[in-house]
Amino acid sequence: MPPAIETRGLMRKYGRLIAVHDLNLQVNAGAIFGFLGPNGSGKSTTVKMLTSLLRPTAGEILINGLDMRTHALEVKQMIGVLPEDLGLFDYLSIWEHLMMIGPIYGLSHQETARRAEQLLRFLDVWQTRHTLAHQASYGMKKKCSLGMALLHNPRILFLDEPFEGIDPVSARHIKDLLLRLSAHGVTVFLTSHILEVVEKLVHGFAIIVRGEMVSHYEVAELAASGLTLEDVFFRHVNPNTDAELEWLG
C-alpha cells in the first residue's frame, strides 16, 4: 500500500518569504501523526496545502497514492478537515452545519441526521445543537467543526489544533475517538501545542521550524532513546533565555 500521506519537495512561498521549504513526509495508513512547531513555523500552511486549500509553489502531494494536482476531487472525498479558522457560518446552528455537510458527500437526509445525532451526542453538544455559531462558545464551535470533518467517515483526518480551547473532559473524548479511528485504519494528521497529549497519542511526529522540517521520530524510537517529546522539541525550538528585562526587579 502507498503511504496515506506523502509529500515530495513541498514548498510554499509568499513573495520572498518561504513559509514551507522542501518538505518530505511519509505517513502510513492508520497512523496518528503529530506535526509540531512554534507559532509561524509553517504548520497551518502545510495543512492547507495537504487539503488543497492552498496551492503549493513547488513539490508534490500524494494522498493514498493520488496526486493532488490531478485528483483533487477524489482526494477531497476521502479526507476530513478541522481547519485553523473552523470554517463556520455565523447564522447557521450547530445542527444545520452538520445537516448541510451530509448531502455534499452523497448522504441522504435520514443518514445525515442519524450520523449527526450520534456525533453531537458523543461530543456532548446535542443539547445545544440549535445554538447559532456566532452565539456558541469556542469549544462548541470546535466540536461542531470536528463533527463536520467526521460526518462522511473519511479515511484521512487533518486536524489543526484539535485540543485548543476545549475542556479536559472533551479533550479526553476526542483523544479516545482518534485512537478508535486509528484502530479502524483511519489516518490522523494533527497539529498541536499540547505536547503531553501529543506524546501519549501519536505514533510518530515531525517538528518544523521556520518552514523546514528539523526532526522526525517514531514514538517507539523516541522511547528507546530515553528522551521525551518535550526534550526533542526544545532542542530545536529554544527560547531566547539570554534576554533580560532590566526594568523588572
Image (cartoon, rainbow, N blue to C red):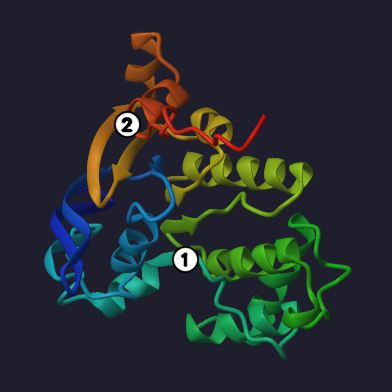
Task: Please indicate whether residue 204 sits to the left or right of residue 162 in the image.
Answer: left
Q: Residue at x 78, y 67 (%)?
A: 137
Residue 18, compared with residue 225, is above or below; it is below
Residue furthest bottom in the image: 91
Rendering coords of residue 113 (x, y %):
71, 78
- Name the residue type under label 2: His
* Distance (Cα) linking label 2 and label 1: 28 Å
Q: Residue at x 18, y 58 (%)?
A: 65
**Quarter of the picture holding the C terminus:** top right
Rendering coords of residue 152 (x, y %):
52, 70
| Sequence-earlier tag: 2 or 1 | 1
Task: Please indicate whether residue 30 sits to the left or right of residue 84 in the image.
Answer: left
Q: Is residue 142 visible?
A: yes
Q: Residues within 10 Å of mark 2 (few under 14, many from 20)?
A: some
- Where residue 196 sits, quadrant-wise, is top right
Q: Which label was assigned to residue 236?
A: 2
Query: Considering the numbered disc 2 on the image, is that residue within a helix, a strand or a loop?
Result: helix
- Where residue 228 sits, quadrant-wise, is top left
Q: Nearer the viewer, residue 218 or 187?
A: 218
Name the front one of labels 2 and 1.
2
Kindly indicate whether the residue at mark 1 contacts the one at mark 2 (C-beta within 8 angstroms).
no
Instruction: Please name the residue that numbered disc 1 is placed on.
Output: 81
Q: Residue at x 83, y 67 (%)?
A: 126
Rendering coords of residue 181 (x, y %):
53, 47
Residue 243, compared with residue 143, is above or below; it is above
Q: Residues within 10 Å of mark 1 (few under 14, many from 20)?
A: many
- Name the residue type under label 1: Val
Residue 169, compared with residue 52, is above or below; it is above
Q: Residue at x 33, y 39 (%)?
A: 207
